[in-house]
Image (cartoon, grey):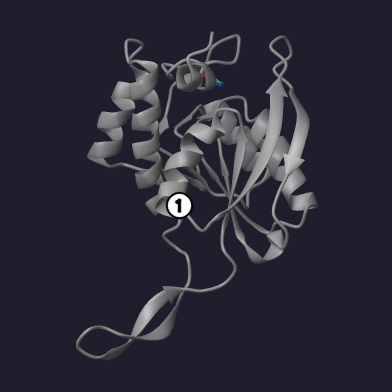
Amino acid sequence: MYANLTVVDHPLIQHKLTILRDKNTSTAQFRQVLREVAVILGCEVTKDLTLGKIDIETPLEKISAPYLEGKKLCFVSILRAGNGLLDGLLDLIPSARVGHVGIQRDHETLEAHRYYFKTPDKLDERLVIVVDPMLATGNTAIDAVNELKKAGAIKIKFLCLVAAPEGVEKLSKAHPDVPIITAALDRKLNDVGYILPGLGDAGDRIYGTK
Ligand code: URA
């Protein structure tokens, strides 16, 4: 296993992942189930958020109660498939800030080409969670993390649904400080950069394109 990889092992995730992998799952169900999985993964990826205390009154008495402290965290969605995970994450944490990185991979060379980058300010004061359902070659993830670090991000995590060993190795080597959280570590990449067994092209499955 890899030192900075967490495979979230929960029966609900594994069940929902099976639905997502099934090629007969409809676009509507795929989108809905991905959103549900994102909520569970979101709990895992945020489990070390720091809590302070605030004074409140319940209907019965005054208490000092736990409350999230610090700057609001920031999700960064790698377009376009990242948005499928983002929806569920925002259900869980509606106040989070959101950045977007547009990266297209060249289908011949599998290299990443960035065409869009927009993030909130004060990245250095936020937990930045990069989201992309598929960690395949790792090129896209590395480019996104490079750019986020240049923009000031210090504490970064990478959240995906399915990871390939090749992508985990490459991202861990380039950015050993970035924990990777996934629902599954699959077998390998095929020769055109798709994850096996995987679930196909996540963007196409979310949006019903080909
Ligand atoms: N991107 C996808 O959407 N699917 C893969 O299998 C690999 C990269």
Quarter of the image for the C terminus: give it.
Answer: top right
Residue 1 visible here: no
- Would residue 95 be found to the left or right of residue 65 on screen? right
The location of residue 21, given as percent across then percent down, is 36, 19
Q: Residue at x 25, y 30 (%)?
A: 15
Q: Which residue is mark 1?
A: 45
The location of residue 51, given as percent across then percent down, is 44, 74
Would you identify the image quadrant in which residue 63 lies? Answer: bottom left
- Would residue 13 be found to the left or right of residue 31 on screen? left
Please identify the residue farthest to the left as the structure is shown. Answer: 60
Q: Is residue 105 above or below residue 23?
A: below
Residue 101 visible here: yes
**What is the three-letter code of the residue carrying label 1?**
Val
- Would residue 145 be found to the left or right of residue 80 on screen? right
Out of 179 and 131, give the one closest to the viewer: 131
The location of residue 52, given as percent across then percent down, is 46, 79
